[in-house]
Amino acid sequence: MASPDLAITEIHAFLCQPQKRQPSAPRLIGHTLVAGSDTFNLIAEIFRKSDSECKIDVSLRPQPDGTQQNDFRDLLLAFARAGGVQAAEPLAYRLAQSTTHRSGQGLLFIVRAVEGGYYTLLLSRFPTNSAIRADLEANVLSVEYLKSVFVRSATSYKAALFQGRDATGDFWEAKVVDKQINLVANEASAYWVVDFLDADFRTTSAQGSRRLALAIRDASREASSDEKRELHNAAALAVNLNGQPISVDDFSDRFALSDSVRTLMRKHVSDDLRREIFIFNADEYGRYISFRSVELANGVTITAESAHFSEFVSYESVRRSDEGEVVRLSAEGVLKSDKLKRRAG
Amino acid sequence: MSLRDDYLDLRHRCLEPWARSLEAYLGDVLSSVDRIDRISVRAKGLERFLLKAEKANDGVQRYADPLADVQDQIAARVVVLYSSDIDEVRQVVLSYFRTIETRRIAPEHYSQFGYEGFHQVLLLPTDVRPLSAPRNTTKVFELQIKTVFQHAWSEAEHDLVYKAFAGELDDDRKRLVAFAAAQAWGADRAFDEALGTLTGRGPREQA
């Protein structure tokens, strides 16, 4: 990933006005930063931190007819090979053509670094904002309204990091910063990933939902009774997340899982896989994990994996009563835990 | 190190373990699909890789950097019983993998018979190829989906073309091989229509 010592060959800046649905808009004029200048050093620092900041994995899409080609990728490769502001401009122009007035103008920096035929490229978009500058000099205060200030800390800052060789299988993946990623279905905020990069989350909905389900299932098999209860409760509530972007780590955070449960899940899913974001699909999740829980009116509850419930639990209908069906449940197995707990109140 | 040595090293360290992992992964995600005859994944053999790496078009080497450009260093094959099953496998694959290429290979003219199959180039999932993998390793694999008849014909025909037998087939023998492809096509149609009759599904067009 982006090495702190990787030699930056060039940094170009473009002011990208929103030009969506304006195919005859004029081309952009770029500016190449002078190496060693304050702005160059600022962007270089962003570049060095980009690997840790760009956390969302995306993959570029092929043509709808299945042809192995992506317009954005072609522009990126052309810039990687040739370098120079002229080769960078088509990328900036494409961004302008993908941006609506709702997202406003942005200042795009394009960074290129090369090491032994291996390219690292960073596209970094600062959104526009307004600010007031104040100067106190010789006891005189002056204030000035700045109409177009570009701020990286804003929620609409975006970046995309690409690394690879000039090869057919490379540059189909990227890591992005998109603080609006939770609104990816919203057209206004989706322009960076969907329209500009023509990309999607690298982990498919089915892939990620399966991964989460298996992590919960496998952790549950090694869990204590309390840990099982915690996991099963969270697992059941997870279906409410259908359609939302999430990662395995996000799941642990959202349901405030205990440290011991998180440790169990970490045993079954690597750090990299736990951080990958995907759109949660409850149906796919349900293919791999579901728990069946039977509760009696007297407070007795028996829970087991749906797939094995009838194998482990004997369920017998005894009689009908005025309150409902009376059933007898029985289960046999090696005792793991028997805790005496006071009832609340 | 030579290309031979580089590939041998990568094949042993990375491609073979990833192929095994991918086969298990595919088996799991396709477990709900009926009528799959087999799923196999293999790392490309050294000699076949070198043969491909040396390919040229009009004197120009096709792969500037074979280790980076050859996209079937890991190749997966799913063989199904009936041609109508291909689409179901495709849909599952599309939901679990990111594609960079999809194409159906078939003779160009309706009067011709030859190789048929459904090919995709897909990104290796991070469950198989970790993010920490060496950066000079492939990031993709090729998936072929075929019927048992398509697979049988392509395997038999492949050996005729690539094995070091003496000489080359004359036109009459080539026509016989094409005739066998037509029979494979006919067998697929016959079984698929019979299946359609039993399941109440009408005759289908090729995927």
Image (cartoon, coloured by chain):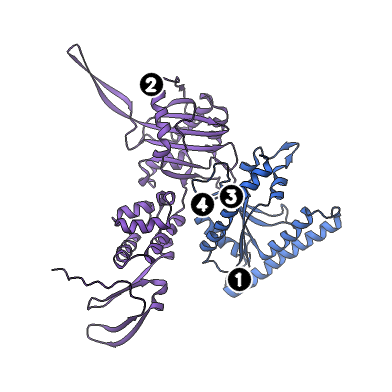
Chain colours: A purple, B blue
- Do the residues marked 1 and 2 share a common chain? no
Read off the residue under disc 2. Answer: A38
User: Which disc number belongs to residue B145?
Assistant: none
SS of the residue at dot 2? helix
Measured Cα–Cα span from mark 4 to mark 1: 35 Å
Q: Earlier in the sequence, mark 4 or mark 1?
A: 4
SS of the residue at dot 4? loop
Measured Cα–Cα span from mark 3 to mark 4: 18 Å
Read off the residue under disc 4. Answer: B125
Where is residue B50? Give x, y as percent.
71, 45
Read off the residue under disc 1. Answer: B196
Q: Nearer the viewer, residue B170 or A99?
A: B170
Measured Cα–Cα span from mark 4 to mark 2: 41 Å
Where is residue B12? Give x, y as percent.
61, 51
Read off the residue under disc 3. Answer: B13
Please tell me whether mark 3 or mark 4 is closer to you in this view.
3
Q: Nearer the viewer, residue A7 or A99?
A: A7
Instruction: Please give the count of numbered marks on the rendered protein.
Output: 4
